[in-house]
Image (cartoon, rainbow, N blue to C red):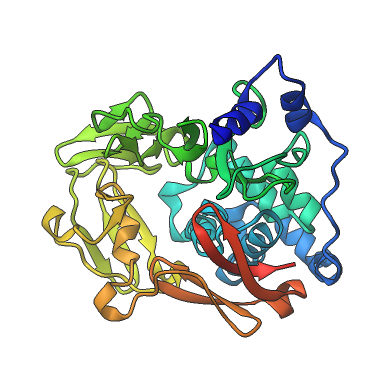
Amino acid sequence: MRRFAIAAALVMPSGVAACVDLFHDTSYELPEAGSLDASVEASAADSATQLKEFCDLDFDEATAMAKRSCALLAACESPMGSNATGKCLEDALPTFACKAAPGRAPRGARLEYYRCIAAAKTCDDTVKCIFPTGVPADCGQIADGGITTCGAAASPLAEVRLDCRRSGSRAYGEACIAKGRTCRRVADYRGECTGSGGLGACASSGCVGTSLRQCVGGNDVGFDCASVGAGRCVDVAHGSACVPTGSGTCPASTVVTCQGTTASGCPGGVPEVIDCAVFGSTCHRIAGASADAGAREGGAPRSWDIARACDVPVDAGACSADRCVGDKLVACVRGAPIEIDCRALLGSRCGSWLTAEGERFACVR
């Protein structure tokens, strides 16, 4: 019962003064990060690079930008959910190096989110990408174990997942738009970034408008195709897929072929490619749906995602989580380890956070 009362106070849209304070107070200032702030300040050359359209970046520029942006996100706003450095890099790398995946560029609010974290130079900048109207006040009295919830409906934080780990702590946030998702609550103390079908009520997979629903145990682990590519969802023989940008047509298929590190496929009826080298991996041919059992998101086959061919197979030594090796973070991106030197990049160290998903490792302040 205590958890219910706390969660309700966090998400009620009106009539509770504490709620107004939580979502509109701008007096809270994120503590300065000491050596982090000075070392993260971008040079004039970095600033010029950030002004380029992502598709104008070369591979090295894009990789450096993605590492810095994702490391800073986890260090300043906690490595919860898609903020975790490895999870962030899964999307940031092909977004910033968009020549590697030209058909899957983000759109709309999702594109603006990645532009925001790419331009961020300090913790204050990064936090504004999650909380554009100001950092929430502290979490108040929290039951043991903490809660997760969503911002108040119809507020600028409606699609932000909030994590309150302990009484009096700041609510840390995850922008659900980073994965093209929305924030949904269940049981008043659990909030998750999900597809439009939400939690506990997703009954049928497939396209619903632009949303690609994938129901697993009543939860929607899909996302909105309006946030990527051509912005459309299409139902095909093998399931559903987001249509990429590009020309031409092809028979929709779950097969992914390889030419060197480049994966090619046609899940949505339009040819698309991705260079697995952007993830630090190579391409592994996928013969079809029967070979897809290991490539899953929340328990659902990712037949719509040709980048699953970039996943390092478990029997090939795939990593499973981000970890620390001294001051370096080894981020796990689709099973491939990508090293980030926290001291050299942020003037910080690698350490652990307690998040809603448990202990997670990241560059820390």
Tell me, yes or no, if residue 158 can be seen here.
Answer: no
Return the x and y of residue 300 as percentages of the image width and height. 26, 47
User: Residue at the left extreme?
Assistant: 290
Going 72% across and 79% down the picture, which residue do you hit? Answer: 343
In this rendered view, identify the residue nearer to me: 32 or 3: 3
Return the x and y of residue 155 as percentages of the image width and height. 66, 24
Going 54% across and 45% down the picture, which residue do you hit? Answer: 178
Residue 57, above or below 106: below
Going 55% across and 30% down the picture, which residue do you hit? Answer: 4
**Where's the C terminus, which quadrant?**
bottom right
How many numbered marks does the figure carry?
Answer: 0
In the drawing, does residue 355 fall left or right of residue 39? left
User: Residue at the bottom extreme?
Assistant: 326
Going 38% across and 60% down the picture, which residue do you hit? Answer: 274
Residue 298, above or below 155: below
In the drawing, does residue 292 fall left or right of residue 345? left
Return the x and y of residue 244 as percentages of the image width and height. 37, 43
In the drawing, does residue 144 fall left or right of residue 316? right
Q: Name the quadrant containing residue 224.
A: top left
User: Residue at the front extreme?
Assistant: 1
Return the x and y of residue 291 as percentages of the image width and height. 15, 61
User: Residue at the top extreme?
Assistant: 15
In this rendered view, identify the residue nearer to me: 65 or 297: 297
In this rendered view, identify the residue nearer to me: 88 or 78: 78
Tell me, yes or no, if residue 257 can be seen here.
Answer: yes
In the drawing, does residue 350 fall left or right of residue 4? right
Residue 236, above or below 89: above
